[in-house]
């Protein structure tokens, strides 16, 4: 039995019900043109699977733009501002978009970040906010639509279709990196299992069935095993009648 067979079997069930499981791919932390980003773009273009690339605007190099803009299957979104932790030492986890500083300062940074995104990518920059570390305070969420963002993406099954009035919520559900285990790849088997977990919950009505299942990567952390598994997952879903990678339009971007 192949390690991705559970994912194929789950997609078989969707196809048997004359349904198509929607999935999407997000990659975080883009700052500079690297071999990893080039390889990611080649995978995306080769399989036709759109990759939503969360760019850190305060750290994004000018040279990143030509590489990303050359790829027609790349969608470019904003990853906070500088991916900098502003939380005090007694707070659990890292927060750039927590209310540990004035809300006005946060929104001002995000606006400057959006200007940088627009300068780099023009109309290819889409108004999705991806919070660093997938953490964002409710008070910040409530201001995003008014600041021009249409979509929020975090991690874990969403509680509603909108995170706030006028703000779509489209999250990820399978992070392929084990951050507490030396940033190592979780393995192809666990990747398949975590995708299946959300797909099955959707099929059974245990979570929002309309939320696409999100694959989350950080390709700067990929080893060769991770690359091979990523390519295999992309190909499996692309070629299966019960699965489909959503493009920019399908995500409402």
Image: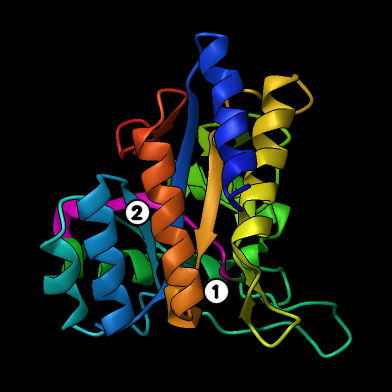
- Element under disc 1: helix
Mark 2 or 1, closer to the camera: 2
Residue 113, percent from left and from top: 37, 70
Q: Quadrant of the C terminus?
A: top left
Tell me where residue 183 appears, x and y as whole percent.
63, 83
Residue at position x 16%, y 83% in the image: 63
Where is residue 218 shown, x and y percent of the image? 49, 72
- Magenta-colored stretch includes residue 69: no
Q: Residue at x 63, y 54 (%)?
A: 174
Quadrant in which residue 38 is drawn:
bottom left
Which residue: 57% across, 84% down?
84
- Where, by quadrant of the figure, is residue 76 drawn? bottom left
Name the image colouring.
Answer: rainbow
Residue 224 placed where, x, y %?
44, 78
Residue 207 visible in this rendered orientation of the protein = yes
- Local crowd at mark 2 within 10 Å, few (<14), some, or many (≥20)? many
Q: Is residue 187 shown above or below 63?
A: above
Q: Kindly identify which numbered label has been placed on residue 166.
A: none
Q: Is residue 64 left or right of residue 244?
A: left
The stretch of residues the image draws in magenta is 122-132
Mark drawn on residue 51 = 2
Number of the label disc, if any, that sits on residue 105: 1
Q: As rendered, which of 76 and 95 lies closer to the eye?
A: 76
* Mark 2 / mark 1, whichever is N-terminal: 2
- Location of residue 152 with respect to 106 vertically, above or below: above
Tell me if 44 is positioned left or right of 16 in this view. Answer: left
């Amino acid at each position: 039995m192949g390690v991705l067979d559970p994912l194929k079997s789950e997609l078989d069930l969707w196809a048997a019900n004359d349904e198509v499981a929607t999935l999407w791919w997000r990659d975080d932390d883009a700052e500079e043109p690297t071999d990893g980003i080039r390889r990611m773009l080649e995978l995306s273009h080769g399989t036709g699977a759109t990759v939503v690339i969360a760019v850190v605007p305060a750290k994004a190099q000018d040279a990143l733009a030509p590489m990303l803009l050359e790829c027609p299957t790349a969608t470019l979104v904003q990853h906070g501002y500088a991916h900098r932790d502003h939380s005090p030492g007694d707070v659990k986890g890292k927060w750039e978009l927590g209310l540990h500083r004035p809300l006005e300062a946060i929104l001002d940074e995000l606006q400057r970040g959006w200007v940088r995104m627009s300068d780099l990518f023009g109309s290819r920059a889409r108004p999705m906010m991806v919070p660093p570390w997938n953490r964002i305070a409710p008070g910040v969420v409530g201001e995003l639509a008014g600041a021009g963002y249409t979509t929020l993406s975090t991690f874990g099954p969403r509680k509603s279709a909108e995170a706030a009035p006028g703000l779509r919520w489209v999250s990820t559900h399978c992070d392929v990196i084990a951050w507490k285990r030396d940033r190592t790849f979780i393995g192809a088997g666990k990747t398949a299992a975590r995708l299946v977990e959300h797909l099955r919950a959707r099929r059974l009505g245990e979570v929002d069935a309309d939320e696409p299942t999100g694959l989350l990567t950080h390709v700067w952390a990929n080893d060769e095993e991770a690359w091979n598994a990523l390519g295999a997952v992309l190909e499996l879903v692309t070629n299966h009648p019960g699965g489909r990678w959503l493009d920019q339009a399908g995500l409402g971007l």
